[in-house]
Amino acid sequence: MKNPELQQPKKRDTHNQNKPNAMKNPDLSTARTVLMLSLASLMLPPVGDLNAADTVHRIGGITAHPDRSISLNLAGVVPKPFAPYFDIYPLEVSSNLMDWSPLAMLQRTNDSTDALSYRDPDAANFFQRFYRTPTNFLTTPLPKPSGPYPVGIVSRLLTDPSRIRQTLPTNNSFMVTFWYPAEARAGVLPAAYMEKKLTELFTDYWRPRAASTVAGFVSHALPGVPLATNQTSYPVLIYSPSAFFRRQNTEKTEELASHGYVVVALDHEDVVASVFPNGQVVYGAQTDFNCYTQECLHRLLEIIRKNIQFLVDELGRINTIDALLAGRMDLERLGAFGHSWGNVGMAEFGRIDPRCKAVVLGDPGWILDAATNLLQLGLQKPFLALNSTGGWIPPEPGHTNWLAPTLALFNKATNDAVWLQIQDSTHASFVDRGSVINDPTLTGNPTPVSRGISLPIKACMISFFDKYLKGEDDHLLDNPAAAYPNIINFQKK
């Protein structure tokens, strides 16, 4: 799917203008700033039926401090269904009302009574300073990524001419999305959280959250902006989803990208559906979720493994010719992670392909039994196994121990293996639906407990990949329970 991208204005840096020796009329300068706040904050049109002045996002007030810094108060009320989530306020600044630069990406907790404010310490360096924020209410279920980089996003349609997709009378084509460390651009709003068609087609997936609410969410990623130039290239992580959508783990893909990774997720043939760039909905080969037999699971393993191998081959081509990504992906530092049965082929890919240097398993459970070679021979490269305590009830009597396959994998490892559980987590806690959109049992709003479950998952993933792909060890995985008490049964080799 081609992300809806706003036309990018040419970047102009207004932060390097010369500061005058003395401000002849500081009161007049402040007055000009106050006047323009009410005008500039309404320059972008609202989305949806939001006409009430107390509803739209806006700059509601300004305070000038003795040190000539400026504090802004941000206002606006979201509709009730979005109250359990967050609102994003992109704040931009100008010295002449023509050249705008990103200043800050603010996030408000909607159910908090605390006012959202921002203090601009650089205001004293300018003769005049103008601010704006779009009136669009930009609601997201995701906490703001914690890394130093803004996050960019683009999608591509890839085709493997060597295979035929079962559900299409065409070559095996599938959608791929990239999240990456980015440079923010003025006038670029965050991308949609999910393709609207997918929220409408699979309403049961979001329950008890209304699909219309999910369709209104945005992410933190900015569509089509350039990659950050802090580094020449960035290590690459491939995400293999479960049977739903490649964007089901946006919280983690954005978090990893904000810490300096290019993250790539693909829609396998067996995801429930995918939306192609022309708007066509392509349904997966497995939409009834009854793929529990060994024969079916082995077929899944081969599909996912071959898709990932093809994707890595394609990344080499993209890294050569793509206008945005060329030369920016360090494919010598390649890792992979997955969720549920997305782990199966991904783990096998990690075992047999030397290009993959490190693997994270996201609650694979008994489905990993399908990877018989993997369990017999082991995964003899660094891996981190993250496991729930609630699990997923096995559909067959023979699968009685949810944790047995990953424990067997850990026991076969000779070194560089980590195994742990997250207290009170379920299988759904390892994707957005369980941790940040609903509570872990999918019965209501996200809670501090459900959001707290995702924190150690993200932290352990970053620590693990940083160690094995960047050579940077923060030693969190020496004793992660010291920092996150909800980590239990920790084992390490």
Image (tube, rainbow, N blue to C red):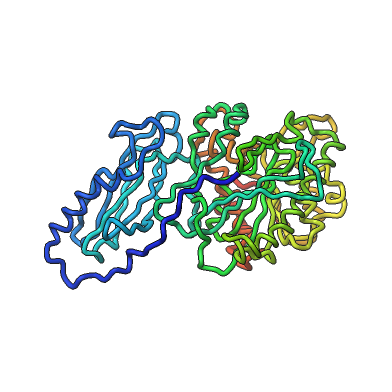
**Can residue 50 be seen at all in this image of the molecule?**
yes
Query: Could you tell me which residue is drawn at 53 percent across and 43 percent down?
Result: 452
Q: Residue extending furthest bottom? A: 21
Left or right: 229 in relation to 403: left
Q: Nearer the viewer, residue 10 or 115?
A: 10
Query: Could you tell me which residue is drawn at 67 percent across and 53 percent down?
Result: 238
Position of residue 65 measured from the top left corner of the image (x, y, whole percent): 20, 57
Query: Could you tell me which residue is drawn at 56 percent across and 61 percent down?
Result: 260
Left or right: 133 in relation to 154: left
As drawn, 51 above or below 417: above
Left or right: 128 in relation to 143: left
Which image quadrant for residue 493?
bottom right
Left or right: 334 in relation to 410: left
Query: Could you tell me which residue is drawn at 26 percent across and 61 percent down?
Result: 123
Q: Nearer the viewer, residue 476 or 200?
A: 200
Q: Nearer the viewer, residue 334 or 224?
A: 224
Which image quadrant for residue 298?
top right
Position of residue 240 measured from the top left corner of the image (x, y, whole percent): 69, 47
